[in-house]
Amino acid sequence: MAETNGKPTANLEDPEEYVTVAEFIEPVFAQMARGALESADIECFLEGEHGNNMLGPAFWARLQVHRRDEEAAREILEAAEDQPEEAEAAASEAEAAASDSSDDKH
């Protein structure tokens, strides 16, 4: 804990705290971004991921990472935006994987 005026206070910059690095209306783009971060060994999760599937535009999926990984995560996501051809191919793969997993449930 840090000290302010001699009193202990919570560390406002806790490296373990989760922060939002991106928001997505389309679940497939959220999955692609999560995959890019996971492939770089950055722990992340999507908050509201399943709300998108149920109610469409009413919810945005928020991609979250630990504060300590925020800068690296933003750089990876920015680089992915600069390579649309690769992102489009990854989107197709993500859609196919999502389709396969939903077929397995039936």
Image: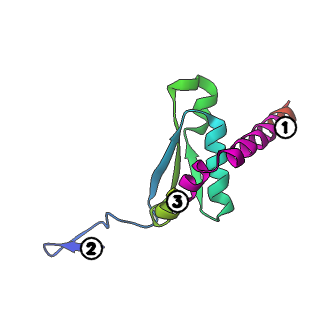
Local crowd size for mark 2, using a 10 Å CA cut-off: few (<14), some (14–19), many (≥20): few
- Mark 2 belongs to which amino acid? Ala
| Image spot of residue 79 (x, y percent) | 58, 56
Residue found at x 86% / y 36%: 104
| Image spot of residue 29 (x, y percent) | 63, 40
- Mark 1 belongs to which amino acid? Asp
The residue at which mark 2 appears reads as: 2
Labels 1, 3: front one = 3
Residue found at x 52% / y 64%: 72
- Mark 3 belongs to which amino acid? Glu
To which quarter of the image does residue 31 belong? top right
Position of residue 3 relative to residue 32, above or below, is below
Q: In which quarter of the image is the N terminus?
A: bottom left
| Image spot of residue 39 (x, y percent) | 69, 60
- What distance separates the C-alpha of mark 1 from that of mark 2? 49 Å
Rendered image: mark on residue 75: 3
Rendered image: mark on residue 100: 1
Local crowd size for mark 3, using a 10 Å CA cut-off: few (<14), some (14–19), many (≥20): few
- What distance separates the C-alpha of mark 1 from that of mark 3? 31 Å
